[in-house]
Amino acid sequence: MKPRLKEKYDQEVKSALKTKRGYTNVHQIPAVEKIVINMGVSTSKEKGALEEAVKDLAAITGRKPVINLSKKSVANFKLRKGQTVGCRVTLRREVMYEFLDRLISTALPRIRDFRGVSPRQFDGRGTYSLGLPDQTIFPEIELDKIKFNQGMDITIVTTAPTNEEAYDLLKLLGMPFSK
């Protein structure tokens, strides 16, 4: 069974983008390529913070996170080469659409005083990044079992060549941008 957001993209968003932007080829229409969720963790401060972050990220995404290691030593940050600095998950295809649907419809509205996400977080090539202050906005996380409040970065990679085309794509998919 196709995810709800994937069906919406196939039936409504593709045709709306084609008429709005005047694409002549179906392959010119932008699409969401992948979503990368990253949690940076300072293991030097708290013992067990990385394990909690891995467990929470696995619960949110349904995939096992990859642990990130530092590539070089930085004395000012008390960081050594090969030390763990966080974890990440890359989502593609159906799982990506299911996560994006849960993010847009349930998680983002649970943020306190939420007025929409900033439309200025595009990188110039159609990739949108947003930072979430807390992992407890996702319904999969049990509030009683939280030991560390952990933020996360979510990067939505699209095939759009410009920011305006990626903005139109995400807006039609239902991303709540602020005015």
Image: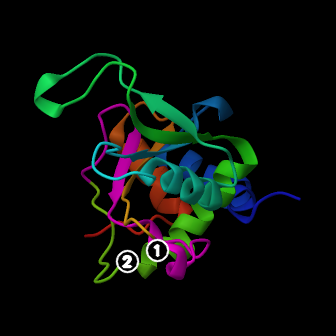
Residue at the location (75% across, 59% down)?
Answer: 7
Q: Residues within 10 Å of mark 2 (few under 14, many from 20)?
A: some
Q: Where is residue 172 in the image (x, y as percent from the top left)?
A: 52, 61
Q: Is 85 left or right of 76, judged from the image as shown?
A: right
Residue 140 appears in which quarter of the rendering?
bottom right
Q: As displayed, is residue 123 above or below residue 59? A: above
The label on residue 111 is: 2
Q: Do the residues labelled 2 and 1 touch (CB within 8 Å)?
A: yes
In this view of the protein, which residue sits in the foreground, 99 or 148? Answer: 148
- Residue lying furthest left: 76
Residue at the location (18% across, 22% down)?
Answer: 74
Q: Where is residue 138 in the image (x, y as percent from the top left)?
A: 53, 71
Looking at the rendered structure, the secondary structure element under dot 1 is helix
Q: What stretch is highlighted in magenta?
A: 120-146
In the rendered image, the quadrant that contains the C terminus is bottom left
In this view of the protein, which residue sits in the foreground, 40 or 9? Answer: 40
Q: As displayed, is residue 115 above or below residue 21? A: below
Residue 2 shows in this picture: yes
The label on residue 48 is: none
In this view of the protein, which residue sits in the foreground, 13 or 37? Answer: 37
Residue at the location (57% across, 42% down)?
Answer: 89
**What's the amino acid at mark 1?**
Ile
Q: Is 41 left or right of 174, judged from the image as shown?
A: left
In this view of the protein, which residue sits in the foreground, 109 or 151? Answer: 151
First of labels 2, 1 by sequence position:
2
**What's the amino acid at mark 2?**
Ile
Q: Name the residue under label 1.
A: 137
Q: Is 62 left or right of 146, judged from the image as shown?
A: right
